Image (cartoon, rainbow, N blue to C red):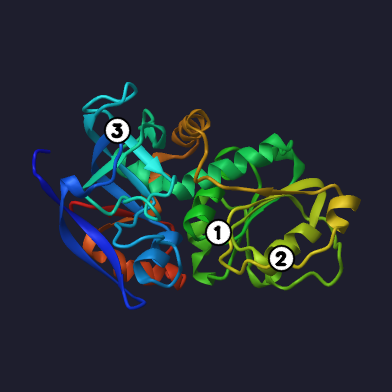
Amino acid sequence: MQNRTFLALVVDKEEEQVHSSIREIERDSLPEGDVLVEVAYSSLNYKDGLAVTGRGKVIRRYPLAPGIDLAGTVVESDSDQFRVGDTVLATGWGLGEVHWGGYAQLARLETDWLTPLPAGLTLKQAMAIGTAGLTAMLSVAALEQQGLQPDQGAVVVTGATGGVGSLAVAILARLGYQVVASTGRAEAQDYLQNLGASKIIDRAELAEPPARPLVSGRWAGAIDVVGGSTLASLLASLKPEASVAACGLAGGSDLQTTVFPFILRGVNLLGINSGTVPAEQRRELWDRLARDLSPDLLDGLTQVIPLAAVPDFGHKIIDGQIRGRVVVDVNG
């Protein structure tokens, strides 16, 4: 790519008002980094929705191109790990928050932020996975490290129609777990069953704070993207020695609980942060994602939108109107 300019969706802030527009950007204005990537696809995550709409304090400096995920081809490299022509992906590491992100046709990045595209995945499929899939797989791996096995009972996934939830359901089902999907969308039953959920419950069942510090143990494990009272409910209803992987706060950041689940049942609350996973572990997780997700299933839960549609879809994802994954074609 020899052009000296490229297109990017740029978010700016003037007098506390956040606005976004597609602009032509000089290549020389990109931040420092030792690898230049021609971006093919990005994705839309909840955090991206907050960034492009200004409904959350995600972006730390303006102007900035959001997009916490990207996938593309190396076009310039001063790195000894990547060569021109390599296909790569990047998630986390402040992309779209403090560093120019994936909603641009070019990105200059640090070597440690990049992961080679796993064999068997296309660039588009990698972005259908993105941060959401990496978070889901990191959550599954954390539960496994605490001893979770498929024969121990039901594993519940909250926010199951969202990006992380959908992929967590699909991964767990593929691994042989009995997956219970929690959702507030009654029309999503067929969708969740196609992902592999064996049972679907209304989110209201878990949304109320528990009546007692401990209730009957129902879950062998849990992946929670909701937080708040839902997380408190899960903690009170885990089986002895079970764990919940907490990776979101769509339902609130406060946690009203007691110590009883921890000291009487020995349950574990596992915090999940996929943004700064070390490079070697990140490659292992991506290899698992390429192996443990069906490409056909992945394609079926994904829609592709052009860069210009991101602001509109940003509002939709914040309002809970998006099901599955949204891939952004930055050249579309």
Instruction: Please name the residue shown 32% across and 34% down the image.
Output: 88
Q: Distance between the residues labelled 3 and 2?
A: 41 Å
Residue occupied by mark 3? 34
- Closest to the observer: 283 or 202? 283
Horizontal arrangement in the rendering, residue 55 relative to residue 1 (left or right): right
Asked whether the residues under the numbered discs 3 and 1 touch, taking CB atoms below 8 Å apart as contact, a structural biologist would say no
Tag on residue 255?
A: 2
- The answer to whether residue 9 is seen in the rendering is yes
Asked whether the residues under the numbered discs 2 and 1 touch, taking CB atoms below 8 Å apart as contact, a structural biologist would say no
- Closest to the observer: 6 or 317? 6
Query: Extreme top residue here?
Result: 80
Q: Where is residue 289 in the image (x, y as percent from the top left)?
A: 47, 37
Instruction: Please name the residue shown 35% across and 36% down the image.
Output: 110
The residue type indicated by label 2 comes to Leu
Mark 3 or 1: the one toward you: 3
SS for tag 1? loop
Q: Position of residue 109 (x, y in %)?
A: 32, 39
The residue type indicated by label 3 comes to Asp
Residue occupied by mark 1? 160
Q: Residues within 10 Å of mark 2 (few under 14, many from 20)?
A: some
Q: How far apart are marks 2 and 1 (CA)?
A: 20 Å
SS for tag 2? loop
Earlier sequence position, callout 3 versus callout 1: 3
